[in-house]
Amino acid sequence: MLKAMKHKFYQKKSVWAEETAKRIEEYAEQQRLESLEKMKKEEDLSHLLHHEIEKYLYTIHPSFLLNPDVVRALHNRLIARSQGRFSVSLHVTSEMRLALDFYNSDLSVFIRLLEKKGFQLKGNEQRLLTALLNKLSENNYRTYLERYGDFVDENLSLQSAVYKYLERVEDHNKYDSGRLDFLHKYLINKGLLMPDFTIKKMKKLVKSFDKMYADDYKVTRLEKRMHEIG
């Protein structure tokens, strides 16, 4: 009888082991399917943002968004929108005003269009902003490289490179966020700046060189214009 009980116990134990293994297998399969579904949703979301932002930025070039302070304010505005509350910006510069006007009159409409196509802002605020700024910065770089040319020769110093920038850029635009973002990436690409050199440091650098060489590059610019006349 004891032998029969042991046999019956081992049979049940074997069944329990099979059932446990089956549950583990079913759970693993469920996790795999959920992971695949999540990856598909992520891919669809990335494709939607890339496709729609690319088309959107053919219609507008808000280079003032490339200002780090503006980016933070805009991120706060997106968070507030997804939470149904109002965000107030106390530090208002000219570019900040442009950005707030842009958000109210243009970007909010674009977000509604994205939502109509299935995008959910809540939880994706940073993702939307990053995708928008990456594409904007890419377009911005291409635009100003075409306008100002590849002005840094091989073995040129950082000081000389900034000098050449100040020669080319209009006085009222030399601290514009779009131009500074272009210069920042351009000098990194040329190996004259480290990738971790910030835009704020870039602006301070340009200002210091501008102060030192303002008269020199103005003379050079005038000389160039007169030479072009004949």
Image (cartoon, helix red, strand yellow):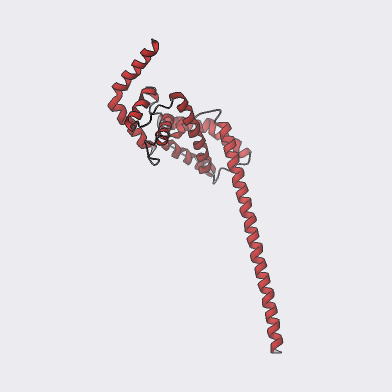
Location of residue 117 in the rendering, given as x and y in whole percent from the top left corner: 63, 39
Location of residue 81 in the rendering, given as x and y in whole percent from the top left corner: 53, 40
> What is the residue that sits farthest to the front in this orientation?
154
Give the quadrant of the C terminus.
top left
- Regarding residue 84, the answer to whether it shows in the image is no
Locate residue 71: give its quadrant.
Answer: top left
Locate residue 194: give its quadrant.
Answer: top left
> What is the residue that sits farthest to the top in this orientation?
230
Give the quadrant of the N terminus.
bottom right
- Which residue is rendered at x = 33% and y = 19% of the image? 220
Q: Is residue 226 left or right of residue 124?
A: left
- Which residue is rendered at x = 37% and y = 37% of the image? 193
Please tell me which residue lies in front, 83 or 72.
72
Location of residue 18 in the rendering, given as x and y in whole percent from the top left corner: 68, 71
> What is the residue that sits farthest to the bottom in this orientation?
1
Please tell me which residue lies in front, 3 or 121.
3
As drawn, 45 above or below 204: below
Please tell me which residue lies in front, 74 or 194.
194
Q: Is residue 139 left or right of residue 186?
A: right
As drawn, 28 above or below 186: below
- Which residue is rendered at x = 53% and y = 30% of the image? 105
